[in-house]
Every structure is written in structure tokens, then in C-alpha cells.
Amino acid sequence: MHVELREATAEDAKAIRALVEVVLPATYDQIDPAYATRELESWQVEDIPDALEDGVFVVGEVNGRIIALVSATIDDRDRFVMTTLHVHPDFQGQRLGSRLLTEVVDLVDDKALWTRYPEGDDNAAAFCERHGFVVAEVVDDPPFPKQVWARLDRD
């Protein structure tokens, strides 16, 4: 199976929404269904084209179907943050997440790369640890699970 990685476009909005509708509940419902719902609400089809202009968005595509997404942006603390890394459950376990991470890391240069995940997301924690991220802080996010912020230094 060949997965093509390419920059996301406004025409991908519906396919991106379809991807997150599958990935977010599959990932977060066992941690906190309300958290999954909150995260899904940030992916409205009509808002996606504008969001694409505010960062880096790369999709993974197989035979014209978007099956993965990674995004990164600069946050209000001037950190380069990987805000999304999603792979459709049918395509997980094929190192696609690692390929997507590499796409983002290549853009960072010498800056640190940050990411966040909810406490209790053992898959995200293991992925981050495997790729050299170090937990930098854990912050409250009531009424949702605490947010774990991890940092990958690029020296």
C-alpha cells in the first residue's frame, strides 16, 4: 500500500472532517467522551479552509482517500506545536504516524517541537516517548482530563 503525503487543501475539508469523526471518538471516548466531543467540535467543515492558512497541514492519502493528518502551528507562547496527528484506525500500526511526525520535525529546524495529549492517552504517551519527546508540564483543563505537554528538542 502506497500512502502519499501532501499538503492539505481547502478541497480536503470534508474528507478531513470525515477522518476526525472516526479517529477522535476511537481515540478519546475511553478516556472522556466529552473531551472527544469538544475536540471534534473544533473541526467544522466550514472552518477548516481558514485553519489551513494558519499552520502546516499534511494529509496521508491512499487511492484518493484521506486516511491521516498532521498539523502544526505557532501558539500564543511562540512554541511550534504539533496540534494534530491522526491516523485512521484501519491504517494504524504501519508507522504512518512516524512518517507524519517526520514531516513536521523537518520544518522545525533548531526549535523545539511541542505537542499535547490528554492524561490517560497511553498510545499518545508511548508514541511521544518512542520518538524522544519529554513531558514538560501537565496542566489542568477542567472539566476535562489534564493536558500533558511534551517537548522534542532539536539540537
Image (cartoon, rainbow, N blue to C red):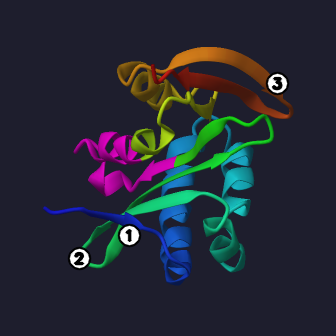
Q: Which mark is residue 43?
A: none
What whole-number distance in Å separates the C-alpha atoms at marks 1 and 3?
Answer: 33 Å
Residue 100: x percent and y percent? 37, 48
Q: How far apart in space, not on screen, are marks 2 and 1 (Cα)?
A: 9 Å
Amino acid type indicated by mark 1: Ile
Asked if residue 101 lies in the magenta stretch, the reply is yes
Q: Quadrant of the C terminus?
A: top left
Magenta residue check for 48? no
- At label 2, counting other C-alpha atoms closer than 10 Å, the crowd grade (few under 14, some 14-19, many 20 or more) is few
Residue 31 placement (x, y as % from top left): 62, 34
Q: Which mark is residue 63?
A: 2
The amino acid type of the residue labelled 3 equals Asp
Rendered residue at 51%/60% (across/down): 57
- The residue to which callout 1 is attached is 66
Label 1: how many residues lie within 10 Å, few (<14), some (14-19) or many (20+)? many
User: Where in the figure is residue 17, as x and y percent of width and height?
Assistant: 56, 70
Element marked by disc 1: strand
- In the rendered structure, the answer to whether residue 147 lies left or right of residue 25 reads right
Q: Nearer the viewer, residue 30 or 67?
A: 67
Give the residue at x 31% y 68%: 61
Disc count in the image? 3
The residue depicted at 62 percent of the width and 33 percent of the height is 116
Tell me the magenta residue range: 85-103
Left/right of residue 142 with respect to residue 66 in the rendered view: right
Q: CA distance from mark 2 to mark 3?
A: 41 Å
User: In the rendered view, does 31 fall on the left or right side of 41?
Assistant: left
Q: Which mark is residue 140?
A: 3
Q: Quadrant of residue 130?
A: top left
Coordinates of residue 136 in the picture (x, y in percent): 64, 15
Going by the numbered disc 2, the residue's amino acid type is Asn
Q: Quadrant of residue 148?
A: top right
**Mark 3: which secondary structure?**
strand
